[in-house]
Amino acid sequence: MQALQKVYDWFQQQGGTNAADLIVGAKFPGFDVSIPHSLKSPNVNEWTVGAGTRVGATGFVRADVIRRDWDNFYIQRVDQTTGKFTDPLGLGIRTDQAFLENDEGNLTRTYTALSLQGQARPFQRLNIGANYTYSKSRGNVNGETGPSGPVTDQSLTYPEFKAFAQNNPIGYLLNDQTHKARGWVAYDLPTPIGKFNFSVLERFDSGSPYSALGTIDVRQSAAGTPCAACPSPAALGYLSSGRVTGSVNYYFSDRGAFRWDDTTATDIGANYELPIRRTALFVQADLVNIFNEKAQINGSTTVLTHKTAGSGLTRFNPFTTTPVQGVNYRLSSTFGKARNPSDYQTPRTYRVSLGLRF
C-alpha cells in the first residue's frame, strides 16, 4: 500500500488528471470515432445453379455452380475531410476524427465454386459416395474472423500513406481452398443384438495460401533516407497519424503467392446401436488419420524490414521504388516453417463416445 501511495502522490504532484503534457496517447470512446450516418450490416449475396439426376434405382449425381459476393464491409476512415476532435474533458487534446462507415467499393471479396457429388447403394447394406469442390476465394479483404465475426477494415485510415499497389492487393484470401474431396464407403450389419455400421472415409484438402507480408515505415525521415519523399503527416494536416503511418502493410509477394501442404487422411469408424423401446444405446469408435500423415498446414510468415529488423535493411519509398530482397527486406530464417505441433494436420487420433438417443 505504501508503494501505491507514493505513486499516487507523485502523480498528483505532476498535476494529476489535469497534466495534459504527460499524456502521450488518448482515446475517448464514442467521441474520437463517430458514426456519421446509418450503417448497413455486412452481407453476402449468393446464387447457385445446379442439376442432378438419378443413376439406377439407388444412386444420384449432382453438379452445382456457386457464386458469393460480399458487400457493406465495415471500415474506419480518417482522411483530410473527417476533421479534428477535441477531448470533452477540457484537457486541450486534439486528434484526428475517425468515421465508422460502410465501404463504398474499395474492398472486394468473392467466392466461386464448382461442386460435384454422387452417391449409390449397389447392395442393400452397402453405401458409397463422394463429393468434390473446386473453388477460388479472391479479394483484398477477409472481412471477418472466426471468433469475432465482422471486423473493421483500416485501409482508409490515413489513405495517403497506403496509396501504393502492394499495400492491399487483390489475390487469394486466407480461406481459399482450390480442391476439396471426400470419398466414403459404409456397410450396415444388423444382428439380433443390435445394429453395427462400419465406414471408411478418405479426405483430400489442398493447401491454404499465405503471403510474404511485412510492415514498413512510410513517414518522412529527418535523416534523409530514401523515404524522405514519402508524405508528411504534418504537411497534410494530420495530428495523430504517427502510430498508423509508422507501421503500414507491404506485400512483398503476390497476395496468396505461397501455399501450405496439401493434406490427405484416411479415417475409419465403427458404430453400434441397440434400440431400447423409444431410446437407443450407441457406441461410436473412430480412428482418425490412421496412417498418421504429417502435412504442414500453418507456419511462420515473418518478413523482416527496416521497421522490424533495424539497420541491417534499408528503408525505401513504396510509392516509387520496387524493394530488393536482401537490401530492403528479407524472409526470416523460419519463413514457411512450422512453429509448433499445431502447425501440422491432426495426427493419428482415437475417439470413443457412447450415449443414449431419444
Image: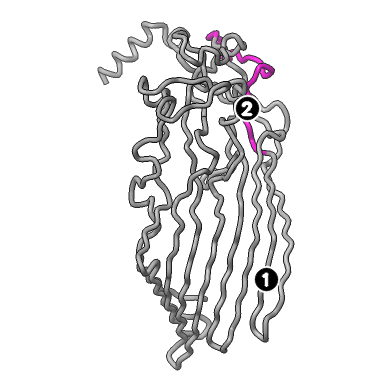
Farthest bottom residue in view: 192
Residue shown at the point (33%, 52%) measured from the top left: 341
Question: Where residue 169 sits in the image (x, y, percent)?
Answer: 59, 35
**Amino acid type of the residue tagged 2 in the rendering:** Leu
**Mark 1, residue position:** 62
- Mark 1: which amino acid? Arg
Q: Is residue 127 above or below residue 88?
A: below
Magenta-tinted stretch: 73-92
Q: Is residue 19 visible?
A: no
Residue 135 in view of the camera: yes
Q: Position of residue 279 (x, y in %)?
A: 50, 80
Residue hosting label 2: 156
Image quadrant holding the N terminus, namely top left
The one of 325 and 42 positioned closer to us in this rendering: 325
Q: Nearer the viewer, residue 236 or 214?
A: 214
Residue at position x 58%, y 25% in the image: 162
Magenta part, dominant SS: loop
* Marks 2 and 1 in Cβ contact (< 8 Å): no
Determine the image quadrant of residue 264: bottom left
Residue drawn at (37%, 11%) of the image:
11
| Residue 169 relative to residue 307: left or right | right
Q: Residues within 10 Å of mark 1 (few under 14, many from 20)?
A: some
